[in-house]
Image (cartoon, rainbow, N blue to C red):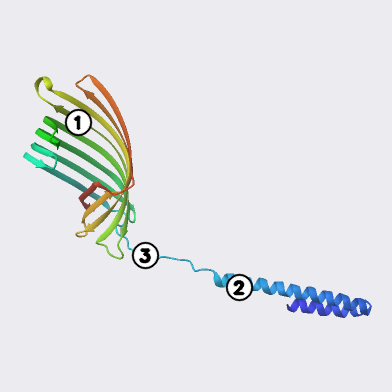
Amino acid sequence: MEHLANFAFYFQKSALYVLPAPTQNYIMKRFHSILILLALLFSVGEFNARAEETDKPEEFSPDFESVVFVPKGQWITGVSVSYSQSNQKDYQFLVLQGVSGDTYSFKLSPMVLYTFKNDVAAGIKFGYNRSLTKLENAEVALSPDMNFDVDHLYRLSHSYYGMGVLRNYFSLGRSKRFGLFTEVQLQMGGGQAKLMTGLGDDLTGNYERNFNLGIGVAPGLSVFLNNFAALEVNVGVLGFDYNHTRTITDQIYVANRNTKTAIFRVNLFSITFGAAFYL
């Protein structure tokens, strides 16, 4: 504004000696109007700039407290083992009647991980599953006039898999005893199974071979009992599985089956418990 005023004064002084009085008055009125308009535009622009600086929202920065839960350079090893067995004799439950038989299942899953970065570990897992079912007799009673009998059923299956794992840990606040982790899993495996029913001339059987491939995400909880041992539990919530099964019936008939499954929910059947050791 000061520069504009000095320029107007200089212009007015010079015009007094050059132009006639009527022309000088007309030009000066126009010139003063232009100066007033420029001054208003300058003031409005400066006000808008200050308003933008004043109204600019503050950046939101969540204040999460966390500490390094698993430091770089640690080896993590552990194993998950489960075994179940049951015997039934004339067992009844809802529509099942007269169930007699034996079953058992066994599962073993060791793992080895290495923490290549603070709270980030990668490694491998292996798994082996085996189950056996011997059913001597069972009856399915849907109604007084509709019953189904199953007898002399034998099924044995075992499967194995290898899994690549990438795990990211998160501490709960500043606690180093309780922590969460997210595990990305890439799994590949296969297995065999045989099923036989009946006796003598009524004996029939199936033999199966299968191959599966899957990828998934499994969050979990880790609880340290001391500086070297922890209990872990995780559950699958997101994943995609592909399974191919080849079945041979009575050594004559051959069938192939492909299945694809996408999971976007908590899979209660994938809950696993285990112990881990941090070395």
201 with respect to 247 (left or right) = left
Residue placed most toward the observer, 169 or 149:
149
- Graded by Cα atoms within 10 Å as few (under 14), some (14 to 19) or many (20 or more), the crowding at tag 2 reads few
Residue 110 vertical position relative to residue 120 in the rendered view, above or below? above
Camera-near label (3 vs 2) is 2
Which amino acid does the dot numbered 1 rest on?
Ala
Return the x and y of residue 50 as percentages of the image width and height: 60, 73
Return the x and y of residue 216 as percentages of the image width and height: 32, 45
208 with respect to 149 (left or right) = right
The CA span between labels 1 and 3 is 50 Å
The residue carrying mark 1 is 193
Which amino acid does the dot numbered 2 rest on?
Arg
Return the x and y of residue 60 as percentages of the image width and height: 45, 66
Label 1 close to label 2 by CB (< 8 Å): no
The residue carrying mark 3 is 64
The residue carrying mark 2 is 50
198 with respect to 33 (left or right) = left
Q: Provide the secondary structure element on which disc 3 rests.
A: loop
- Graded by Cα atoms within 10 Å as few (under 14), some (14 to 19) or many (20 or more), the crowding at tag 3 reads few
Is residue 184 visible to the viewer in this orientation of the structure?
Answer: no
Q: Provide the secondary structure element on which disc 2 rests.
A: helix
Return the x and y of residue 20 as percentages of the image width and height: 94, 78
